[in-house]
Image (tube, grey):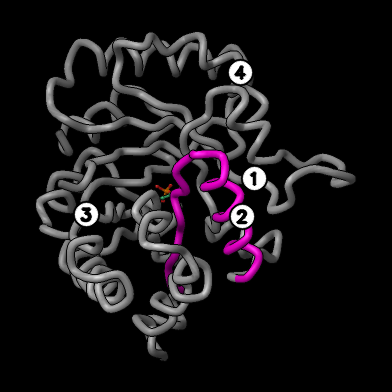
Amino acid sequence: MRKKIVAGNWKMNKNLDEAKALVSEVVNMVRDEITGEVDVVLCPPAVYLTTLRQYIPTEVRMALGAQNCHEKESGAYTGEVSALMLKSIGVQYVILGHSERRQHFGETNAQLAEKVNRVLEYFMYPIFCCGESLDQRENGDYVGFVKSQLTESLFHLSPEQFSKVVIAYEPIWAIGTGLTASAGQAQDMHFELRQHIASKYGDEIAQDTTILYGGSANEKNAADLFAQPDVDGGLIGGASLKSREFTNIVKARQ
Ligand code: PEP
């Protein structure tokens, strides 16, 4: 059975007091209102991870994730954060290959393959982001493009390693734009990706792979998206900054 996950990507938002308040509110709401089997992952800015960990009681089904890590083990990489560092402060998930990192920081599929390796070496779960631009969707083989992101960054993994990876399909044209993929568009791509995974790792692993949708998901459209058979949860940006809305999205997934 694959895991249902709702992850919040806070991006570069909130000061420390606001971050503490947000995590406390989400913890309380999730503890009181969520009874189903859904893993909640909060991905605040890295600088807050150590502090915020103390705000998450062990009985609440909630984990911390980072938004990125460096691909090297350690060394002279000023300003960077390694997988070992994240592991040592209790981080369990690491978002990798978000389109904003690909766009603004030039991350490549080959570099992401290395980041995935580091995250797995330290027994954390990569949340590997993939997705096409609007131009690719309108004018190109966008399904082939997204499949190639998986092939180039993930298909070197052993089946055992791959089974730890969470995929997040995030069409770039839907991120932060208010333009959500329709439930049908999300389902079509998730189905294609699952087939692609099956072609490399077999049906059992493909069926067990958690594939999240991300891109302007909110409390209004979440239920529709999550009703799709291949949509296992969400990676939520803007709406994860509002505790009530984020919890409502988790509710829609439980
Ligand atoms: C994201 O950044 O991963 C994301 C899905 O953002 P938003 O929900 O704001 O579109």
Q: Kindly identify the residue that appears in the image at 53 percent across and 23 percent down.
A: 90
Indicate yes or no whether the magenta region holds residue 111.
Answer: yes
Which secondary structure, mark 2? helix
Which secondary structure, mark 3? helix
Q: Of the two numbered discs 2 and 1 on the same chain, state the one appearing first in sequence.
A: 1
**Residue, disc 3:** 208
Q: Of the two numbered discs 1 and 3 on the same chain, state the one appearing first in sequence.
A: 1
**Residue, disc 4:** 50
Q: Of the two numbered discs 2 and 3 on the same chain, state the one appearing first in sequence.
A: 2
Q: Is residue 120 left or right of residue 88?
A: left
Q: Of the two numbered discs 4 and 3 on the same chain, state the one appearing first in sequence.
A: 4
Residue type at the position of mark 4 = Thr
Q: State the extent of the magenta-drawn residues as a range.
A: 110-132
- Of labels 4 and 3, the one closer to you: 3
Q: Kindly identify the residue that appears in the image at 44 percent across and 81 percent down.
A: 145
- Of labels 4 and 2, the one closer to you: 2
Which secondary structure, mark 1? loop
Q: Is residue 212 left or right of residue 111?
A: left
* Mark sitting on residue 115: 2
Q: Residue 250: horizontal and vertical position, in percent?
A: 23, 32
Q: Kindly identify the residue that appears in the image at 79 percent across and 43 percent down.
A: 74
| Residue 160: quarter of image | bottom left
Q: CA distance from mark 1 to mark 3?
A: 25 Å
**Residue, disc 1:** 69
Comparing 123 with 189, the one in front is 123
Circles 4 and 2, Cβ within 8 Å, touching? The answer is: no
Relative to 17, say whether 73 is above or below. Answer: below
Residue type at the position of mark 3 = Asp
